[in-house]
Image: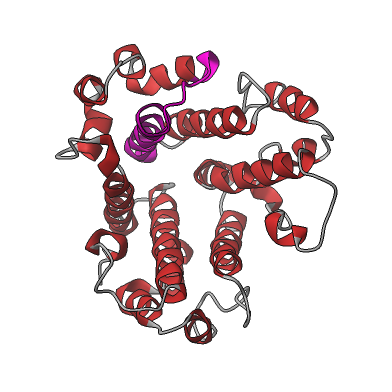
Amino acid sequence: MTRARALRTRCLRAEGIRKVAASPTLEDALRYLAATPYRHDVTSGATPAEAQRAVSATLLWHLRVLAGWQPATGADAIRALAAGFEISNTEHHLRALTAEPRQPGMERLHPPPYRLGALAIAWTRLARTRTPSELRTALSASVWGDPGSDSPAAVATGMRVSAAIRLATAVPDAARWAAARLTLLLGREVFVVGRRMPDVSARRAARLLGPRAVGAGSYADFRQALPATARWLLDDIDDEADLWRAEARWWDAVDGDGRELLRQSAFGPRPVVGAVALLSADAWRTRGALEMAARGGGLGDWPAEVLSAPG
């Protein structure tokens, strides 16, 4: 697993992330990134969204390289960990299917899909669909399962729930992350947005969180009903309005667990899972730092949790 450990050098790490965040302009941040492992897809003149997407594309490339070095079990683990890229592709595809006729600037609203390569789960079939109904049918016939509706909200939620279940099953070392991520999704959907989860997604979510948590009528009851694998995420988060803090806490946990997994010398997928965790957390923090730079740089007005990257 030497190659997995070597990918730690592709992380920007705390010092670099803080330099990006402190950049007085987005263009200054992009110039800094041009000399880092994120340089491949970062270009001068990019919008904040384009710059953040370029960071994600670099992460995806590193995961594809790592998957190419693995036996089947290792590649399967990376595919489950990287499912968010296929979800993003599908969301953009669905928006394009329901968009008004093409107008100038639409390419920025509907960017080219991520190039998934061997990390694709069902993207080839999903990309060929031409209506929301066809997309739902294709999802239902794949491992993603029926999202319960062809609306953008139902598809996004259904795919994320499915991804969490698959991750917990396929990558036992990531089961804690999967349960906590599903907790964050459910908490936002139900208690912040006020949107009821489709029945089919609720039933799937109950496999990880239990029926009491999924059916809770209040945020307080939801927290109390969560299993231990997920309850830690909402410790001292007494109000649903503060769920943004749980996002940063989740990434801190992924980063910390990833470091521990990467230190283990045993053969098997653990160092690979650890490498994916570190690369993913670094990319998330770098995207946050780019947003700070786009807003004028400096760290004083931003919560410490957003840049809580270890050294």
Residue 259 is left or right of residue 106, and the answer is left
Q: Position of residue 57 (x, y in %)?
A: 60, 63
Picture quadrant where residue 18 is located: bottom left
Q: Main secondary structure of the magenta part?
A: helix
In the figure, 264 relative to 3: above or below? above
Q: Residue at x 46, y 82 (%)?
A: 25
Q: How many marks?
A: 0
Q: Nearer the viewer, residue 140 or 80?
A: 140
Position of the C terminus, as image quadrant, is bottom left
Residue 203 is left or right of residue 50, and the answer is left
Q: Residue at x 71, y 39 (%)?
A: 94
* Residue 249 is one of the magenta-drawn residues: no
Q: Residue at x 34, y 22 (%)?
A: 209
Q: Residue at x 51, y 34 (%)?
A: 160
Position of the N terminus, as image quadrant, is bottom left
Name the outermost residue toward the left: 236
In the figure, 91 relative to 196: above or below? below
Q: Position of residue 301 (x, y in %)?
A: 26, 69
In the figure, 91 relative to 168: above or below? below
Q: Position of residue 51 (x, y in %)?
A: 57, 70
* Residue 189 is one of the magenta-drawn residues: yes
Q: Nearer the viewer, residue 236 or 276?
A: 236
Q: Position of residue 84 (x, y in %)?
A: 55, 45
Image colouring: secondary structure
Residue 160 is left or right of residue 117, and the answer is left
Instruction: Specify the segment rendered in magenta.
Output: 173-201
Picture quadrant where residue 112 is located: bottom right
Picture quadrant where residue 21 is located: bottom left
Q: Nearer the viewer, residue 130 or 106?
A: 106
